[in-house]
Amino acid sequence: NAGVTQTPKFQVLKTGQSMTLQCAQDMNHNSMYWYRQDPGMGLRLIYYSASEGTTDKGEVPNGYNVSRLNKREFSLRLESAAPSQTSVYFCASSPRNNEQFFGPGTRLTVL
Amino acid sequence: RKEVEQDPGPFNVPEGATVAFNCTYSNSASQSFFWYRQDCRKEPKLLMSVYSSGNEDGRFTAQLNRASQYISLLIRDSKLSDSATYLCVVNEDSEYALNFGKGTSLLVTP
């Protein structure tokens, strides 16, 4: 099993550009999550999906949208990127509201 | 948002030393507790769950004190490979998401 995969690994955007971060898991987990990690701030939840067909806002949802395409895939979209969205983005999945398994992350820079 | 607090460190210890980290949480209704490990520029990975009775996994021992709302992690006989950031993580029963502390940095030196 590949576990949780994320694409791309690195991305540089200009202010105002849009992009979608992709995440997929092959562990048949119900719940999936998107976090951002900034120096000194720790991991902060952006959005989560408790099950296929549902999504909910986390702590820092502004400027982002998500789609739970099916049980395997959960994408994060930046419609109009801002320098404040420069961060490392992690996707995670869990079989229930418990231990989470993380993908390798996407390092995003917005100029 | 309920808080999970950790001493950021860094903790610099020699190989073979014993080191302990503490973490406090503010939500008394929290149900599940974990320690995650994160290596530099890598994703967090589960180190161990923390059970009410305390639990041990090799050189690692985790303790939970519900009355005082703190969690501890003890590492015995430190190895160079233990150098990482250790994240204290709390699950609040009403939430699907985990609440992460900002992490404690450990550097084990030869």
Image (tube, coloured by chain):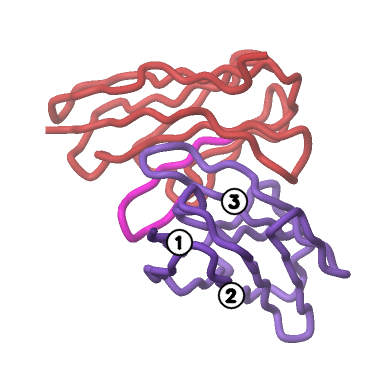
Chain colours: A red, B purple
- What's drawn in magenta, residue-wise? A33-43
Report crowding for label 2: few under 14, some 14 to 19, many 20 or more residues within 10 A (C-alpha): some
In whole angstroms, how far apart are the C-alphas of marks 3 and 1?
11 Å
Q: Is residue A27 left or right of residue B87?
A: right
Kind of residue sitting beneath label 1: Lys
Local packing at callout 1 (Cα closer than 10 Å; few below 14, some 14-19, many 20+) is many
> Mark 3, chain letter?
B
The quadrant in which the N terminus of chain B is found is bottom right
Magenta includes A76? Answer: no
Q: First in sequence, mark 3 or 1: give its number.
A: 3
Q: Classify A111 as above or below B91.
A: above
Q: Nearer the viewer, mark 3 or mark 1?
A: 3
Between disc 2 and disc 1, the foreground one is 2
Residue at 51% in and 36% down: A34
Taking depth in this image into account, of B45 and A44 the one nearest to the observer is B45
User: Real-space Cα distance between discs 3 and 2?
Assistant: 13 Å
